Amino acid sequence: DQHDVAAPGRGPGWSWDESDEQGRFVLTGLTERDYTVAAMDPETLLRMVEPGVAAGRRDVVLVVRTGELFPRLAGRIVDSHGAPVPNAAVFPMCDALETRFEGSVISTQHETATATSTDAEGRFALERVPKDLVYLRIEGNDVIPLEWGRGLAGGLAKLVGGAAEQLVIAVERRCHFQVELEVPAEAEQLGVLDADGHELTISEFRGTNRNETERHALVEGRSATLAVGDSAATLVLYRAGGEVRRVPIRLTPGTPTSLRL
């Protein structure tokens, strides 16, 4: 049970084991109560779940239900203008383990299955993908990473419908920019809106790490080199939590845009 399983010496978290060649497993460190027991196939990320299992039982059987897999998922990755996105990585991903403490998620462990890459036409194909509890991660050097289907009730089955081999998934091209204010004290933070006024996620990439925020700090009137999707239309400056100025912007993928305001 992801809410309050405690294993000796490990604090709040999960009690887990890896099945042996015969599929056998043992979970230790449990209290006398009922649990939900779950297992995951590492090759496909397909999960098997058995609720209402009393601690101490030795006859628990988890069955792999292959009918809960798409035999094949295929389609195209395109940008916001419908142009193909080549050389993007596409792979199934899931939030495998969540550790909760006092009702709040304090950490998440992700798992991934084998990736494929899009061809020159943006086409991709994956085999044996779970219909639920898994999403597609799409990433590349010139796109904003997308987790397609993450957190959606009904999972990929709802998104895919009857078009398992005719998918068209749109991603945003990654646009880099840096802000420098003529009057450094004018603002302490910046945000970015699309043409409809929706606040965009701002990414800061450092090596293989990515930090995401909707407001980014300005230090002495300067920002780090940041990235947003190509739908960015307006830069918003904030001071003391209040908006001080809006500036129309047009960013393009490729060379970072310097915004001197």
Image (cartoon, grey):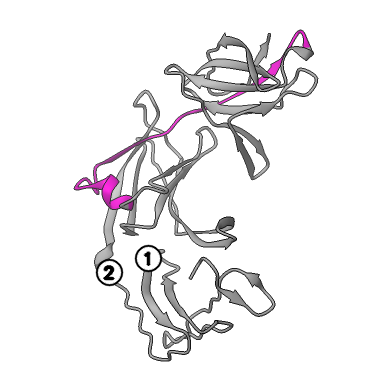
Q: Is residue 60 left or right of residue 100?
A: left
Q: Residue at x 58, y 9 (%)?
A: 247
**Residue 100 lies in magenta, yes or no?**
no
Q: Secondary structure at mark 2?
A: helix
Badge 1 crowding class, 10 Å Cα cut-off, few under 14, some 14 to 19, many 20 or more, is many
Residue 106 occupies quadrant: bottom right
Q: Are marks 2 and 1 in contact (CB under 8 Å)?
A: yes
Q: Which residue occupies the extreme left position in the image?
A: 162
The foreground one among 122 and 132 is 132
Alpha carbons under labels 2 and 1: distance apart: 8 Å
Which residue position is annotated with label 2?
66
**Mark 2 packing: few (<14 Cα in 10 Å), some, or many (20+)?**
few
Q: Position of residue 138 (x, y in %)?
A: 45, 43
Residue drawn at (55%, 82%) of the image:
31
Q: Which residues are magenta?
A: 155-183
Counting from the top left corner in percent of width and height, residue 16 is at 54, 76
Vertical placement of residue 90 versus 185, above or below? below
Label 1: element kind: loop
At horizontal 53% and vertical 19% (from top left) the residue drawn is 252
Q: Classify residue 43 by image quadrant.
A: bottom left
Is tag 2's residue or tag 1's residue first in the polypeptide sequence? 1
Indicate the position of residue 255 as horizontal and vertical percent values.
Answer: 61, 21
Q: Residue at x 36, y 79 (%)?
A: 62
Please name the amino acid that badge 2 sits on. Answer: Thr
- In this figure, which residue is indicated by the disc labeled 1? 46
Residue 1 vertical placement versus 24 (above, below)? above
